Image (cartoon, rainbow, N blue to C red):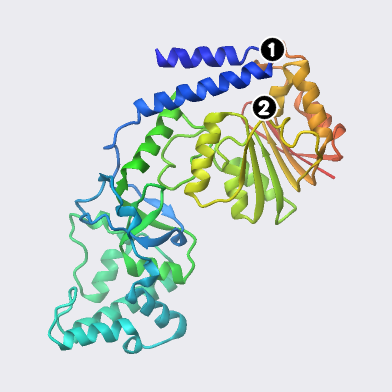
Amino acid sequence: MLQRLKNLLLKVEKNSRIGPVIIKFLRKVRFVFYKIYLSLFKGSNNDFDINKILWVSPERINFISAAGADIVLGRGVVKGGDWDKKGRSFSDILEVQAMKERYENSIAWAETAWYKNMAKKLERGERVRNFNIKKDLDKKTRDIDRLFQSIEENGYRRNQEVSKEYHDSLNTRGPDENYKHLDEILVDIGRDGELLHRDGRHRLAIAKIFDIPRIPVMVGVRHQKWVDFRGELKQYAELTGGALYQPAYHPDLLDIPYVYGEERFDLIKDNLHLESGTVLDIGANFGYFCHKLEAEGFDCTAVEVNPQEVYFMKKLRDINGDSFKVVESSVFDFRSGEKLAFDVVLALFIFHHFLKREETFESLKKFLQRLECKEMYFGTHSGLEDSGLEGAYINYDPDEFAQFVLDNTSLNQKTLIKELDGGRRLYKLYK
């Protein structure tokens, strides 16, 4: 019944004869519907593959988990509470500080605070971790040196790949055969998607020292609120045809199906003339392009009229620590009456929706005429045969549409970057 109600709302909303005020109201109603539906059907808490590898930047892992779960038996666990708010900084670990001193400043192990502290405890007869005597401590420092040298010479590899050869070379016992496949850096995930360190401090510290872009990690405990958010996204994907339009850009969410991945972004990045500046993304969906371009050094503004997409976009922006601006508005109402100056504009497969009615077509022309930019990446529909535009007020083939945009902006050149699936095209428009 809920699915039928959703389809009815969409059908009414797409009726070209109703006005923008009613459309805006229906979108709000549909957003309320989605929130009710998502709260009722959040998905299973027990669908986690404990063998799943996430590829993440080491710089995302800055605090230690206080979940307190076993590093093997605690995998796939969902846990509420404040455990994700209590961890200390990874950089405060004395052993991590000693590694930085050792490998960045060439300080001898014996001169580091960590080594001195451990040696004193052993001299007093205390058993510290797996160390009984100072000889054990010295062996550990040699093991860390060998690990550092291995990563320096061979790069960072899956521990599963190198574990046997590494431990054989040291004549030490590696991980238990039953659990060797789980022997990667282990993180827990907090309520806001934060990656919290639990195991594998030496590999993580070395990855940070070498500034390695991505490393493999496995997940132990997930916070209940994070799992709830994952459930919302999964249900939203099911409600919108079985897949998200864009990736949910967090390492633990990339297993949720999506339609369009990195290809379009890579095409834009390869054609960008600028290395920094301001970006306007029209019809931004989840803000994937703003997230990616912000990482490249751009100051981005995402405009999106759909309340559901805005809800998830703000969540994902905050989860990733991004700072791009989110504007919930029709692009026609964005800074209405003002000139809009941006270095780069993304108009990706959105403008053809404005060809359906005379009112929105005229609004598109007015918007373009107040837009000032250096480059526009313009995605077109497939043209006259596009099934979504029967009976439209006006239609263009892709090349005509790109020329229409040029005629109504200060841009005067176009380059076809690529013809994509279904006859859609991606153009670069520029001065």
Residue 195: give its label. none
Q: Is residue 203 left or right of residue 283?
A: left
Mark 2 or 1, which is nearer the eye? 1
Q: Is residue 1 left or right of residue 316?
A: left
Residue 69 in picture, x, y percent from top left: 22, 54
- The image shows a total of numbered marks equal to 2
Residue 428 vertical position relative to residue 163 in the rendered view, above or below? above
Crowding at dot 2, Cα within 10 Å, few <14 / some 14-19 / many 20+, comes out as some
Q: Secondary structure beneath disc 1? A: loop
Residue 85 vertical position relative to residue 100 in the rendered view, above or below? above
Residue 239 vertical position relative to residue 260 in the rendered view, above or below? above
- Residue depicted at 57% across the width and 47% down the height: 291
Q: Is residue 367 left or right of residue 152?
A: right
Residue 54 in picture, x, y percent from top left: 39, 50
Q: Quadrant of the N terminus?
A: top left
Crowding at dot 1, Cα within 10 Å, few <14 / some 14-19 / many 20+, comes out as few
Residue type of the residue flagged with mark 1: Glu
Q: Quadrant of the C terminus?
A: top right
Residue 390: give its label. 1
Q: Is residue 193 left or right of residue 180?
A: right
Q: Secondary structure beneath disc 2? A: helix
State the image quarter where residue 142 is shown: bottom left
- Residue depicted at 48% across the width and 40% down the height: 248
Residue closest to the eye, 164 or 64: 64
Q: List the residue tagged with mark 2.
A: 423
Residue closest to the eye, 122 or 261: 122
Earlier residue among tags 2 and 1: 1
Residue 26 in picture, x, y percent from top left: 57, 18
**Residue at mark 2 to residue at mark 1: CA–CA distance:** 17 Å
Residue 148 in picture, x, y percent from top left: 38, 74
Residue type of the residue flagged with mark 2: Gly
